């Protein structure tokens, strides 16, 4: 059961991280970085949350 949960977290986390990476190179993010000098909360949430979910999923699978 934990392996199934791990696979779901791993796949979902990777998808969220990829979406966050694509969002980081979007026009809205470039404008925000130019004005604010940092990433927006949405991009950081996708990158960090996706990475953490993928890490937990990987730990549960192995």
Image (tube, rainbow, N blue to C red):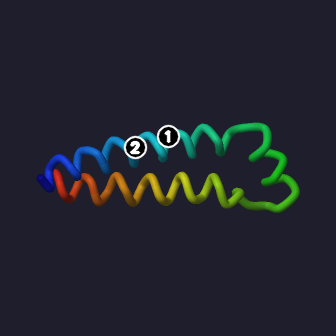
Q: Quadrant of residue 42?
A: bottom right
Work out how far the residue at label 2 is from the one at label 1, CA to CA, in angstroms: 6 Å
Residue at horizontal 23 percent and vertical 45 percent from the top:
7
For the residue pair 15 and 39, the one nearer the viewer reads as: 15
**Label for residue 29?**
none
Q: Determine the secondary structure under disc 1.
A: helix
Local SS, label 2: helix
Q: Answer with left or right where residue 34 lies relative to residue 38.
A: right
User: Callout 2: 10 Å neighbours few (<14), some, many (20+)?
Assistant: many
Question: In this picture, is 10 found above or below 55?
Answer: above
**26 relative position to 1: left or right:** right
The residue wearing badge 1 is: 18
* Displayed quadrant of residue 41: bottom right
| Closer-to-camera residue (39/12) | 12
Hey, which residue is sitting farthest right in the picture?
Answer: 35
Q: Please say if the residues under marks 2 and 1 sit with CB atoms less than 8 Å apart.
A: yes
Q: Position of residue 1 (x, y in %)?
A: 11, 52
Give coordinates of residue 9: x percent, y percent.
Answer: 31, 50
Say which quarter of the image contains residue 28.
top right
Within 10 Å of disc 1 (Cα), the crowding (few <14, some 14-19, many 20+) is some
What is the x, y in percent for residue 15?
Answer: 44, 40
Report the residue at 48% width, 46% height from top: 17
Identify the residue position indicated by label 2 in the image.
14
Spot occupied by residue 44 in the image (x, y as percentages of width and height): 60, 58
- The residue positioned 28% from the left and 45% from the top of the image is 8
Mark count = 2
Q: State the residue at coordinates (48%, 45%).
A: 16
């Amino acid at each position: 059961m934990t392996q199934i949960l791990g696979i779901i977290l791993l796949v979902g986390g990777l998808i969220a991280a990829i979406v966050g990476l694509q969002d980081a190179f979007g026009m809205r993010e470039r404008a925000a970085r130019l004005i604010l000098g940092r990433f927006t909360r949405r991009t950081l949430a996708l990158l960090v949350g996706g990475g953490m979910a993928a890490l937990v999923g990987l730990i549960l699978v192995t």
